[in-house]
Amino acid sequence: MDGVVELGSVLAAPSLAGLLVLASHVPLGEQVLRRGIVFIDLAIAQIAALGVLLTAGWGNGPFSAWWMSTAAALAGAGLVAWLARAWPEQREALIGLVYVGGAAAAVLWVSSDPHGAQKLRALLAGDILWVGADSLWLLAVGTALFTALAFRHPTALNRDIVFYPAFAILVSLSVPVLGLYLVFTALIAPALGVHRLRQAGHPRARGAAYLIGVIGLLMGLTGSYLLDTPSGPAIVLALIATAAVSSALAAVRLRG
Amino acid sequence: MRTPTDPQYRVRDHQRPRRWWGPLAVAIGLVSFGGLSLPAQARLNIFTCAPEWAALARLLAPEAKIFSATHARQDPHEIEARPALISALRRADMAVCTGAGLEAGWLPMLQSRAGNARVMTGAAGMLLATEGLPLLEDAHHHASRDKGHIHPEGNPHIQLDPRLLARVAVRMADRLAALDPGGAASYRSRLGGWLVEWNSRIEAWQQAAKPLFGEAVIAEHSSFAYLFRWLEIYQAADLEPVPGVPPTVSHLQALLQRARDDPPLAVLQALYQDPQPGRWLTDKLAIPLLTLPSTVTTDGSTSSLEGLFDHLIRTLLTAHAQRRPPR
């Protein structure tokens, strides 16, 4: 029993952070899939990450870091939206270049920094275990506002003017906490796992997507504890596996 | 733009959803949590930040349960957070870390997440090995914050000077005795026995390493600086332009220009460092690249402290014996 208590106490804060991110990213992920803009998400998250790196030395505390990364993410979202409108034919290619360009700029920026490699890796793979109360607090406020909005105006997210800023703000809040890989997976994997259910008009598709997210998160965290591996990548793989299994189960169910 | 009235989102008539999610979640939860077992009880739980402190702790307190946060193939400056680190520090009665800023990138966060008052900095259970030791003030010390500050306190890589290891061992035995008075006599007697043996080894190593006196080498970072000071080897240059910043092309070019006329004995790199810059330089200079453990390894001949120093000195002596005659 001791082992279980200890597991709970070590993993409580990271679980909470993961659940907070899932709360907003599951509905956002549905939108991303519906709009067919999967890679826009990667590009915006990368630009938010670049903003965190560029402004790391500017101010103190998580608030200033968040402010800068949000500004960067909003600018990135604006850039992507403009590119998509100006050259709709080349949209995917341009988004790919924005992502790679952002990543290359980040590598260049930290190349003279003694802790650069570590910072880059933290933004990609995330340090969900080190999540502190201050960054959780911001994430909780952002998630609460988003959830309230989504609850009162369920269709508001369908509008570009609501979706893109909400998306940019929430992504920039979660990338410094969970890392780019985990944020992208939390967005896409649950939504994709219930894709068939949603297409079949299943009333519980949203609930199933949350369940995929929660199971993947807890399995990944527990697995990383038992196998002594970094947690972020373990959760990413667990989420992908859970989504794949769910998708297969749903296919069998819907056929039968 | 789609709205909820689109066909895709309209609820179709179909049979009542079956509830297969609930049992699945329960099954996965049981499997996940079932694998946990009770930690074995030991007299003292000792957490160490680096393998050399684990090796010393094993010598002084062989019956203790010892956990090392890093191994020889990891960069001790930065490690990735793993849940097991938090629970190991939470259980620890004593922690031994290097200090002098070496673990500044991860230990404070680990301490705050573990919330174990016994091993907070300043508590009796937290021993910082570099505390009170005269540290080398090389580039580590002089680099300013915006260009490559890592350890303003001085070079923390003390583990390759066996004389400093002995001083750390004395303090470790004192601390163990204070935390576990029942075992005090045995910690002291083990320390005494080990010191006698260790001092005679130091003598022997110094004798064996005489041919290396005054030799020049190039190394990456100041990982081996204490070894060089002890054996009076001269580190002519560092592969890193600034401590902690990976080698750049222009810096390597400058090193090549400087070293071409009078090539050093070898280029030394630690196991965890990227071998490519060293390989590039040693190819151009036609000197050996020595990839050496900078601390005790998990297995093999360098898994003990004496094995580590034997290996380091033997490798340098071999390079010395096989050196090509000057062109």
Image (cartoon, helix red, strand yellow):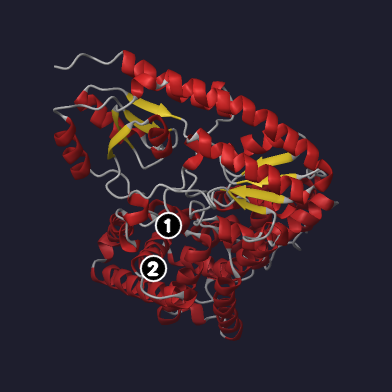
- The quadrant holding residue B236 is top left
Chain containing mark 2? A
State how far apart marks 2 and 1 are (Cα).
Answer: 10 Å
Q: Which mark is residue A119?
A: 1
Instruction: Decide which of B41, A12 is in the foreground and name it.
Output: B41
Q: Position of residue B27 (x, y in %)?
A: 79, 49
Q: Is residue B273 left or right of residue B325?
A: right
Labels 2 & 1 near each other (Cβ < 8 A) = yes
Residue holding disc 2: A56
Res. B188 visible in picture = yes
Q: Residue at x 54, y 52 (%)?
A: B131
- The quadrant holding residue B189 is top right
Q: Quadrant of the N terminus of chain B?
A: bottom left
Q: Amino acid at mark 2?
A: Ala
Q: Is residue A99 left or right of residue B58?
A: left
In the figure, A170 relative to B307: above or below? below
Q: Position of residue B215 (x, y in %)?
A: 29, 26
Instruction: Decide which of B9, B22 is in the foreground and name it.
Output: B22
Q: Residue at x 74, y 40 (%)?
A: B65
In the figure, B32 relative to A45: above or below? above
Q: Amino acid at mark 1?
A: Lys
Q: Which mark is residue B105?
A: none
Instruction: Decide which of B281, A21 is in the foreground and name it.
Output: B281
Closer to the chain start, of discs 2 and 1, is 2
- The quadrant holding residue A21 is bottom right
Q: Position of residue A105 (x, y in %)?
A: 28, 58
Chain containing mark 1? A
Q: Judging from the image, what secondary structure is the residue with disc 2 in?
A: loop
Pointers 2 and 1 within a single chain: yes
Q: Residues within 10 Å of mark 2 (few under 14, many from 20)?
A: some
